[in-house]
Image (cartoon, helix red, strand yellow):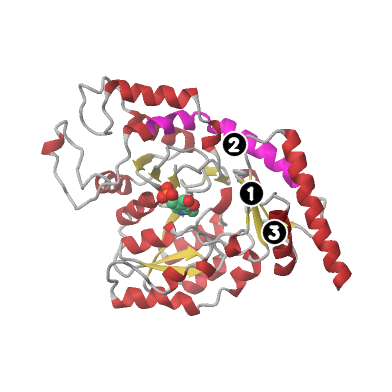
Amino acid sequence: MPGYEFFGEEERKHVNDVLETGILMRYGFDGPRKGIWKAKELEEAICTTFGSKHAQLVSSGTAALTTAMSALGIGYCDEVIVPSFTFVASFEAILSVGAIPVMVDVDDTLTLNPEAVRNAITPKTKCVMPVHMCGSMADMGALQDICKEHKLILLEDACQSIGGSYKGKMLGTIGDAGTFSFDFVKTITCAEGGVVMTNRDDVFTASDGYTDHGHDHKGADRGADLHPFIGYNFRISELQAAVGLAQIKKLDNFLAIQKKNHTALKNMLAAIPEISFRRIPDPAGDSCTFLSWTLPTEEITRAVVAEMKARGVIAGNFYWFDNNWHYIRKWDHLKNAITLNALSPEIKAAVMHHANKDFSASDAIMSRCVSTAISLLWTDEQIREKGEMMVSIIKQVLAAQKAEA
Ligand SMILES: Cc1ncc(COP(=O)(O)O)c(C=O)c1O
């Protein structure tokens, strides 16, 4: 997810605009800022680019999730259904608003299994949070139906899928709200940053105030703003927004390169009949930041990963099953409810319940899955070399396995 790979003149120009005024804050200082409003400009660009009615920039993707949940009224002991394959930010944000993360299985889309969502619904369920992992989408049609039927909030975590779409709508703009992260390794980056997108006026107004100490932002005098509710400081700075403004203008180019490189690598791996690719509910909407593929067994996959490591092609190939950030298997701090401050007994028990929950359906997929990150900087020659090396390793492992059998 490599916006940082194309960092240059345009980013420097927008940052310099801000440095010349010296006004690094996104609110106030109307005179001295001399018409430079990078955060506002980026919010407008986000609305236009992704087709969202509103956009509220924040300091990170994690802050975006927290803000969206607060603005949607999700709070104490509400249950939020999330996938077992995601980033730790999902449950961090849920816990930060006093709600309960309910992790459920993923399927071969590497995102929420709609049947697992149905089975997890209880009277306390308030929200379903699909996470569009690794550049591609959850089965949004099925999840929308479930949310409609059970009157649940649909909050999309599209932090890893900027520029992806589902049936013509951009990911992050389909549910009640959606979020992007603009951290350093996302498709477009601000260094650190994020956004809440929503078509709902009430959710936008709440997000706007919540991220700035509850300010109502109604008057020209910041000191005279009213505080209709308690908020926090999740503001983005003008410097970060300036970088994002340069990056969003390059998004179409990023996506076109990603698609080209993704297709080239996929065509090479597709020559191996034992490889299956991640199921994509709407293939035209894949943002192609990763190519995710599976092998027939965990044993074969582990042998391939070990050989890729030995031959130096592991960089950019992620075996999530052993990864500490992204898959429930390694989240001992969650399963043991280790927090710095006291959790309520109900929340603690609900969180610790994950230690004994059966995730064998997720394990069966994640233990066989490798995701290859697609770089914008690869030359055709480098893709060919990488692909040939991967194909040779996979074939070698498969042949050794057959010989043993
Ligand atoms: C799926 C997902 N959600 C949320 C986040 C949090 O974003 P940030 O790092 O900007 O807080 C990330 C970051 O990697 C992510 O991958």
The amino acid sitting under disc 1 is Ala
Amino acid carrying label 2: it is Leu
Characterize the local packing of mark 2: few (<14), some (14-19) or many (20 or more) Cα atoms within 10 angstroms. many
The residue indicated by pointer 1 is 315
Ligand 1 has an atom within 8 Å of the beta carbon of the residue at disc 3: no
Q: Is residue 261 magenta?
A: yes
Q: Main secondary structure of the magenta part?
A: helix
- Depth check: give the residue in front, 396 or 118: 396
**Magenta segment range?**
241-266
First reached walking from the N terminus: tag 2 or tag 1: 2
Disc with the residue nearer the chain's start (3 vs 2): 2
Q: At 70% from the left edge and 64% from the top edge, which residue is drawn?
A: 302
Residue 106 falls in image quadrant: bottom right
Where is residue 15 drawn, in percent x and y?
A: 38, 26
In this rendering, the count of numbered labels is: 3
Q: Which residue is mark 3?
A: 305
Q: Nearer the viewer, residue 119 or 66?
A: 66
Question: Does the stretch in magenta take in 299?
Answer: no
Q: Which residue has dot 2 on it?
A: 255
Give the SS element for disc 2.
helix
